[in-house]
Image (spheres, rainbow, N blue to C red):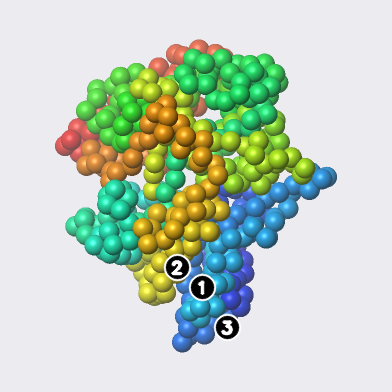
Amino acid sequence: MKKLISMLLVLTMIGGVMVSCGNSEEKSGSDDQKSTAGAVTSSADQTEDKGEVNVYLHLTQLILGDEKQDADGNTYRDESTAWLKFAAEDFTKETGIKVNFVPFNDFNGEIKPLLQVGDKGIDLATNVVTLTREEKELYLAPLLSVEEAKNIYDDKFVDAMSKNDAGDEILMWQIAKSYSNGIAYNEDVIKAAGYDEIPDTLAEFTTMCEKIRDNGQVPIVLHRVENWPLSTVSDFSDYIPGKYNAIADILNSDDPFGDSTSLGQMIKIYTNFKANGFFEKNVYTDFGVAMDAVSQGKAGMMLFGSWLIPQLKSRVPEGTDPSIIKFDAAVDYGSGRHITLTNEWDWGLNKQSPNKENAKKFLDYISKRADVIAKTGFIDARTDVTPIVPELYSMIDQKIADGTVTPIYTTQKSDDYYKVEEILSDADLWADYKYVGLLFDSYDTENPGWDNYKKEVKTQNKYFLNSKKSLGY
C-alpha cells in the first residue's frame, strides 16, 4: 500500500512549491481530486532553520478551489476560492514555516495505512474522526491539554472533543462548530412541487418527495457509490429520541438493528426512501456530479451537514442566484424537529511526526482564522476570536428562537458508545459503515419486498450479539 501510494506523487508547495496529494471532505470527491489520491509530499528546497509541516486534507476545495461549471457545462476549479491555501501562505510569511498540502479521498484507505506503519511524512491530518478510540490513542499525539483547551473554548465544546485515555489531553482538535445533520435543498425544486419550505413531519416530507419524483426529478441525492454518505444515518438516529449518542442504545438491545432501536428505525426509514424511489436510480459516480444535480435543479436535496452549502452554492449555473440553495433542520421523526449543534473540522497530529511544534503552530493559526472557517460553512468556536456567522444559519437560528426547532448538543462519546464501536468492529460491521450499508443494499428495487431486509436484520443482530457476548459486555 505504501509503495503504491508513493508512486502517485504530486507536488505543489505553499511558500515555494506547494505539495499536493490525493483526498476529499469531508466529503467531496471530484475526478481531479481522485487523480491525486495517495500522493506523498516532500520539498527539495526545504529550509531547515524555518521548517515545514505536511498537512493531509480531505476538504480539498479549500486548497484547489471550488468546482464550478462554465457556460458550456465544463467543470473547472475556481482557484480564487482556495481559502486555506491563501491562509497557509499568510502563515508562511509570518513564521517562515512552509506548508505542504496533501489532498486525499479516503482516510481509511489512504491515510490510516500510513499511520499504521509509522510513516513520518504525515504531520497533520483531517478526518481522523473515523479512527476508533483505541486507534486515536495508538496513532495520534496530544495537540493541547484539556486545561489549555478550556482557556480558548467553552466547556461544552471541550467536553465533546476526543481525549486520551487519561482524559487530560486533546487527541482530535475540532476548531469549529456548526449546525449539522440537516437538509440542504434547492428552493426552486421544492417550490415546483408546491412547497415554500421543508415540511415539519415525516409524512408531509414523504408526500413532498413523491411530488418531486413525479415531476421527473430526484428527490434526494445519496451518492451511494461510496459508503460514507450512509454515515449520516447513525447521526440522524439521534433525532428519533431527541438526544445525542443514540447509537449507544443498541448495546442493551436484543434487536439492535430492528424496529426497537432508534438506529434500526432510521436505517429502515432510509431504506424505505430507497423503496419509494426517492434516491437516484443511476448512482452518480462522483460526489461533485451528485452535488451538481442539486445545484442545477435536477434534484431536490441532500441530507448532510451545513458544510455542504458553500459547495452547492458555488455550483449553481452561471447567472443563477446562489440563494436558491437553502439549509433547514431535519423533519420531525417523532420527538420534534431537531438540529445537531456539533464540533466540526477535526484534525489529528501524527504521533510519529518530526514536526510536531510546527504542526501545532499551524493549527493554532488556522483555528483563529474566522474568515477561512466561515468559508467552509462552519463557525469559529474560539472564545478569544470574533466569529463570522455564515448567512446559511439564519433560518435555523430563527426557528430555534421560535421554539419550532430544538438543538441537540454533541458531547464526549459515552462508554456505551465505545463498547458498541468495539462490538461492531469485532463483528466486522464497523468499518466503512457496513452496519448501515448491508441493510440498505439488501433491499432490491428491481424485486420489491422486505423479506431480504428482514433476513439481514436477523443476521446482523446475531453477529452483534455473538460479539457482545464474546467481549464480555
Q: Is residue 354 visible?
A: yes
Give the CA separation, mark 2 to mark 1.
7 Å
Say whether disc 2 or disc 3 marks the residue closer to the N-terminus: 3
The label shown at residue 45 is 3
| Residue depicted at x 51% and y 35% | 395
Q: Position of residue 320 (x, y in %)?
A: 74, 40
Point 45% across, 55% down: residue: 387
Q: Residue at x 83, y 45 (%)?
A: 72
Q: Earlier in the sequence, mark 1 or mark 3?
A: 3
Q: Nearer the viewer, mark 2 or mark 3?
A: 2
121 relative to 152, above or below: below
Q: Furthest-right residue in view? A: 72
Judge by depth and name the residue closer to the eye, 233 or 87: 87
Amino acid type indicated by mark 1: Phe
CA separation in Å, label 2 and label 3: 24 Å
Amino acid, disc 3: Asp
Instruction: Determine whether the residue tagged by mark 1 lies in a helix, strand or loop.
Output: helix
Circle 2: residue type: Tyr
Q: Is residue 470 left or right of residue 48?
A: left
Q: Which mark is residue 91?
A: 1
Q: Quadrant of residue 252?
A: top left
For marks 2 and 1, the one nearer the N-term is 1
Labels 2 and 1 touching (C-beta < 8 A): yes
The residue where tag 2 is placed is 365
